[in-house]
Image: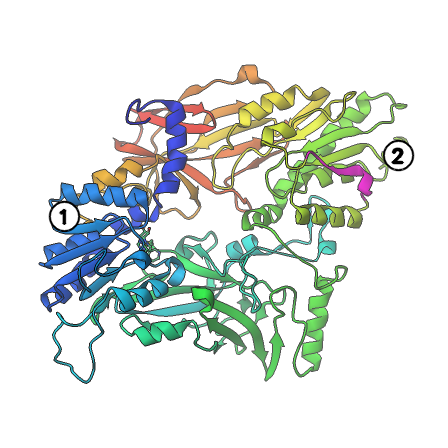
Amino acid sequence: ALKLRPDFPEAKENFYRVANWLVERWHFLMLNDHGRNHKYQLAIKKAVEGGCSSVLDIGTGTGILGMCAKMAGAVEVYACELSKTMYELACEVLSSNGMADGIKILHKKSLDMEVPKDIPNRVSLVVTETVDAGLFGEGIIETLIHAWKNLLLPPPNPQQPLSSSAQTGRVIPAGATVYGVAVQCEEIRRHHRLCVSSIGGLDLSMVGQIYSPVCCSADSEDSTEPYTTERLSRLRGGYVQLTQPFSALDIDFNNPQELEGLCSREVQQLRLYVTQDGLLDALAVWFQLHLDEDNHLSTGPQEETCWEQAIYPVQTLFNAVKCGDEILVEVSCKDSYLRLCCIAIIRDGHMFCFDSGTTGPSNILPANPEAALCSALASLQTRHAQPSQAFTLESSEIALLNNTAYHISFRKAMSTLLASLQSARSSQELDPVFVLDVSEGFSVLSLIAAQLGFKPAEDKQTSNRSGLVKAYSSVEKEHHQMILRLLAGANGVPESALEFWLRHVEDDSAVLQRPNTQRLWSAIILDCIETCGLIRQKLLEKASLARCLLEDGGQIFPQRIVIHGMLVESETLLVENAVQGTEPTLGFNIAPFINQFTVPVHMFLDLSTLECTRLSEPAELFTLDLMNSTLNYTEKQVKVQVSTSGKITAIPFWYRIELDSEESVISFSPGSHWKQAAVVLQQPLVVSTGDWVQLSTRLHKSSISINAIK
Ligand SMILES: CCc1ccncc1CNCCCCSC[C@H]1O[C@@H](n2ccc3c(N)ncnc32)[C@H](O)[C@@H]1O
């Protein structure tokens, strides 16, 4: 559609979401990483010149490694790629670089390949970079075990060192070493554990523990993924190393027996010496790929490389460590995922075991006064709930709960609304006001509203406000409802004041219906901004539907959203968005093909840690009025003055979310659970201090586009 009508907005907006899905963003990072590409080229060149005449590139992506092998003089070069989009893209790249005849490319997963059906003979070299931040997450172990069995010539036999490379097989990378370090990091903690005991006036201690699905407890059920990924060097507030980096695992990809044995290798226990007091929030893990004896690629946090690290959050409550302690870590490779798990802290010869990742230390080995104190402390924190009680919420839902400022502001705004409704009602009117929360995901806002309805009357004059509010929540998941029921009970809100609304309706707009034939809503709570920093789709449609369902004096929360933005120069946003020319890709012409999949809006950006030069002050770019649609428009021009000379490459943006005329929250603020987004300009705009730049912001179907002209 875009090729036919490039400015067709529906296609454009869908395309951006589709492009993000079809082609992973790390392709741009990888291809722009000249250091990485050059090291692979050197290793491949050395192997081919050393006699590896037939090469298979597994997971070729754009085809760059296969082309290196061809350029190095390999006689037979094959490539396979399981993604259809990447396969078709690689075909275009090969022909554009005159290698369509020299390289046979297959749209296949290597595991489905066999000799002679797919490739005529076994090859002497496999090159691949089918690795993720946790090394094994793209299946490289299974891929190589299969390759050694079916696609590669046998490995060199140490007894016959002289067997030429033409008769033996080998893999680039030759192996990998996995490293880790224990870290304290508040930003990781905020996403994986509840860090507050009350939010917006609700006491949370009743609910037991709440964790993210990322947990590596020894008895991990399959539903959890063992690690998440973060760019440690870009985490808000940074991190503190609590131990020295340690080496967790070594793997030789040229040793089929070792590969076979990896997953059955017994669990390895490491004792990490704590060198710094702090809170043990996670283990951060990275690796070195040994392409060959001389060329290594590291994904470590200290490198200026662009890769993320694997993060294994420590979910236990009792995570204070002191210099001199030792952290007991188990390393295993279960179901071909690399798993690291902190299982205990050793202090003065005593071991405090973390339970299987659900609560604080429960079975503490040899008891001693300090241990007893620790376990008392831990149980203190879970004083009410049955300690075995633990709930799982998405990390974005946990970060939202930890955003106390947002919940406090919401409580104030809701209280103001209830007071105004209360004064407007005749005293004898008894039936409650209806509040509906249609937030996506887990939300306690409905409960905050319900609790306000049961606040004991502040002063004797006003009638007891008990039962003023009847709150409805559209949370659907069973455990979400369980948490809300527990919280209602613990916060004096009778079950009758909170109802679950229209579960499992076909589309999320259908939950917007009147509470009953006689009544309308006094407040409807909408979820406007996605965690990634974009406006939620169909927001304006939902708001206009919601407005029709409000009774007089009723309100939508939030009332207004003001988009703020600023001019920045950021090389980082460029390299994460498009391949810059042919230089980084070893002179191969790849950019025009992969750049078809660039998306002008970069999301999940943490603007507080983005390396960039700010070229202007923040400016208000656009306003969305959810209460009064007549004030809305689809395009707005704003003039912004350049405060520092430079090259505008992107316009990051965020939101002031106005709950009412007094209360608002900013989506770009320290405690915020929202990330920011940025429009990346097609052509950087060179500007000088004092210049005026006109920004025209368009909002079409929740998709923001911003053009800058001098
Ligand atoms: C320093 C490396 C690094 C470190 C940390 N984070 C990222 C990186 C960068 N590498 C990311 C590659 C990750 C994706 S793998 C690349 C391409 O290969 C394809 N594939 C994967 C397996 C597979 C197979 N068995 N048979 C055929 N094709 C296969 C995928 O469809 C993808 O297009």
Question: Crowdedness of circle 1 by 10 Å Cα count: few (<14), some, many (20+)?
Answer: few
Q: Position of residue 208 (x, y in %)?
A: 70, 58
Secondary structure under the numbered disc 2 in the rendered image? loop
> What segment carries the magenta color?
493-502
Badge 2: few (under 14), some or many (20 or more) residues near its Cα, within 10 Å? Answer: some
Q: CA distance from mark 1 to mark 2?
A: 77 Å
Q: Nearer the viewer, residue 234 or 169?
A: 169
Where's the C terminus, which quadrant?
A: top left
Quadrant holding the N terminus: top left
Kind of residue indicated by mark 2: Asn
* Image location of residue 603, percent across then percent down: 42, 40
Which numbered mark, 1 or 2, is in the foreground of this view?
Answer: 1
Determine which residue is flagged by label 2.
464
Q: Secondary structure at mark 1?
A: loop
Quarter containing ligand 1? bottom left
Q: Give me the residue at 14% from left, 72% from top.
A: 167
Query: What amino acid is labelled 1 in the image?
Result: Gly
State the residue in front, 642 or 525. Answer: 525
Question: Image check: 185 left or right of 64?
Answer: right
